[in-house]
Image (spheres, rainbow, N blue to C red):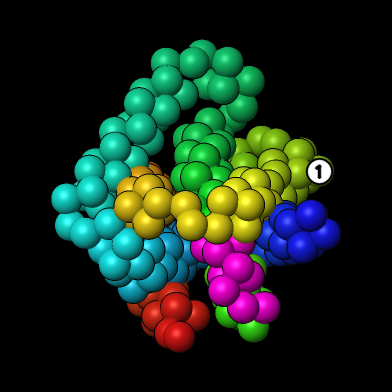
Amino acid sequence: MDLLLKVSLIGLISGIAGTGAGGLMAFFIKDISNRTLGFIIEFSSGLMMAVVCFELLPEAFGFSGVYLTFAGVIAGILTIIAVEEYINSTDYIKKSYKNSSLLRTGILTAIGLALHNFPEGIAVGSGFGASVELGLTITLVIAIHDIPEGIAMALPMRLGGLSRFKAFFYTALTGVPMGIGAFLGAFLGGISQELIGACLGFAGGCMIYIVLGELIPQSKNLYRGRFPVIGNMIGLICGIIVTID
């Protein structure tokens, strides 16, 4: 029980610390140019796509094969589309916040990354089940690449009209599913590999749609120059570096 509690706390703290560290940007950003914001959003897009293509999906294929993984991807895409439609139909956000499109981007990113953190938490718990060294390595890698993803959530939320504290709080909150996943991974131990793969595929599908259907279009609406594209490429390279074992 002590080990289970420790692993769960490690997953929870690292999840909150990773995204929360990125969320701290909400306290320091007052007003930035569309050019800079476009760069940051594109950087986050490149990073997230690298995580999906070089970490999530390869792991998912290894766990559950092609068909279950793609079923998870499609389910993830459809889920985010449904959430997006619901947000678009909600008048409260449009009426209450001046930059409602930026806030929507932040909300969708938060949902996608929260769903992404859950199977990664399972990976943390399972890693500790195999060895402490493996568990710590997985935890560190996830926490590091959660930082820029936290920035990708916090900035649109803050610039979309939320207070600094709310933007930070909601960003840090997306790390909680990692603690839940770590608990399940450590508790169940021999949890179905196919289920883990399907969950990773689902998270990958969510992130693919958020990047291609929300983040990049939002960046293009903000600034159409070359600078954001450079941010995307830098983010992609950084994502590849982070996901190298």
Total of numbered circles in the picture?
Answer: 1
Q: Quadrant of the N terminus?
A: bottom right
Task: Name the element at disc 1.
Answer: helix
Instruction: Give me the residue at 52% from left, 40% from top.
Output: 111
Residue 188 position, x and y percent, is 56, 51
Residue 207 position, x and y percent, is 39, 51
Judge from the rendering whether residue 153 lies leftward or rightward of residue 104; answer left or right: right
Residue at which label 1 appears: 165
Residue 66, picture quadrant: bottom left
Please determine whether, in this image, residue 114 is positioned above or below residue 39.
Answer: above
Q: Quadrant of the C terminus?
A: bottom left
Please determine whether, in this image, residue 183 is positioned above or below residue 52.
Answer: above
Q: What residue span does the magenta drawing correspond to? A: 123-132
Judge from the rendering whether residue 207 lies leftward or rightward of residue 170; answer left or right: left
Could you tell me what secondary structure mostly forms the magenta stretch? helix
Residue 143 position, x and y percent, is 64, 68
In magenta stretch: residue 127: yes
Residue 7 position, x and y percent, is 72, 62
Judge from the rendering whether residue 51 lies leftward or rightward of residue 140; answer left or right: left
Instruction: Give me the residue at 37% from left, 35% from top.
Output: 80
Residue 93, picture quadrant: top right
In magenta stretch: residue 88: no
- Identify which amino acid the numbered label 1 is placed on: Phe
Asked if residue 31 shows in the view, the reply is: no
